[in-house]
Image (tube, coloured by chain):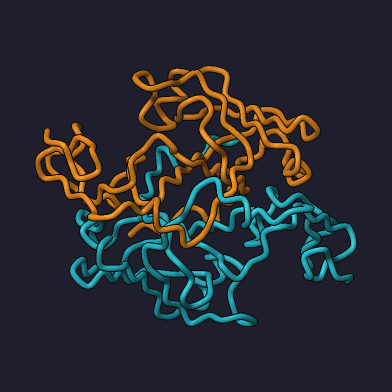
Chain colours: A cyan, B orange
Amino acid sequence: MTAGSGGHETRAGEVELDFDPGAEADAGIAFIGRLRTPWSRGDCPKNLRQARERGGDFRVEVDPPYRPGLKGIEPGARVMLLYWMDAARRDLIVQAPAHADGPRGTFALRSPVRPNPVSLGAVTVLSIDVAAGVLRVDALDCFDGTPLVDIKPWIETVDVPPAG
Amino acid sequence: MTAGSGGHETRAGEVELDFDPGAEADAGIAFIGRLRTPWSRGDCPKNLRQARERGGDFRVEVDPPYRPGLKGIEPGARVMLLYWMDAARRDLIVQAPAHADGPRGTFALRSPVRPNPVSLGAVTVLSIDVAAGVLRVDALDCFDGTPLVDIKPWIETVDVPPAG
């Protein structure tokens, strides 16, 4: 590894942008809550499937002004969470993950390292308390305290792309 | 309808935030390209299923610095596009859509009107030109020129939530 222009470690084959997308604010994100998970750096599952296998207490906490937006979400609902991977660098456009056989473009990877670090979590709601702004869900794959960006109903007829 | 605090029209039962989430920039989004579609205000399909039925020429245009990030995406790949619905208001937390039987929380709806107007498009790649930064995809459900935020591989084992 060598130190990249942003002061980060860079592996062979990786390509950095010569600017920080985080400094190019074309639009602003408002954090609407936080995700509560058992995970921190070093022990975080790589994806939701692994998180589901390991299990734990997974909660979505929504800030007070946004809680009326939860009305209509029922236990058993399938939802898509959008969250902001605030610990990830944003300036790596080709990456060499340890599991891959060579460098790959950032948009061909699910790495949290990307120009806009919005991650997706397709989960099932176990319980919901609208007044308290708390949803318990079946799995989460991010660090405890990760900022929440959005919650959407997951809809099979639009959210599964046709096989190529 | 009555004029809301933000100068927007508000329907019976709708609830507005008393602030504009767009002014609460906890993080910045960098637009990485644009979506090219046949749609504009008044004739836009409500979702990807409708867009697929109507058909058309649908393209993703990625800006030059981000094009190396496309390496590894092949025709036939299923991807998730994230895009920024820049024409949508952000301050409506309970909505009364024409198709629903009453007001519902924003997070129980797929409306583009939401605190952070990031939309999701689960699509199939028909062709890709990495050097030109152009992907043709099977459908898009947003206005022509909508800003692109991210492209991710769609992965069935993590992107389909378990049935509740």
Instruction: Name which residue lies at 78% across and 44% down.
Output: B68
Compared with A141, B42 (above or below) is above
Quadrant placement of the C terminus of chain A: top right
Residue B12 lies in quadrant: top left
Q: Residue furthest left?
A: B12
- B66 vs A45, left or right, is right
Give the camera-side residue of B29 and A53: B29
User: Nearest the camera: A49 or B38?
Assistant: B38
Query: Residue A62 or A159: which is nearer the viewer?
Result: A62
Where is residue A90? Give x, y as percent. 67, 59
Q: Quadrant of the N terminus of chain A?
A: bottom right
Hey, which quadrant is residue A16 in on the image? bottom right
Front in this rendered view, residue B25 or A8: B25
Residue at 59% over, 77% down: A44
Q: Position of residue A89 (x, y in %)?
A: 67, 64
Image: B29 above or below A53: above
State the image coordinates of residue A142 (x, y, percent, origin top left).
53, 71
Give x and y (percent) for residue B28.
54, 55
Residue ID at (37%, 73%): A59
In the rendered view, tell whether residue B125 sits above or below residue B92: above
Q: Residue at x 50, y 18 (%)?
A: B38
Q: How many marks?
A: 0
* B97 displayed left or right of B157: left
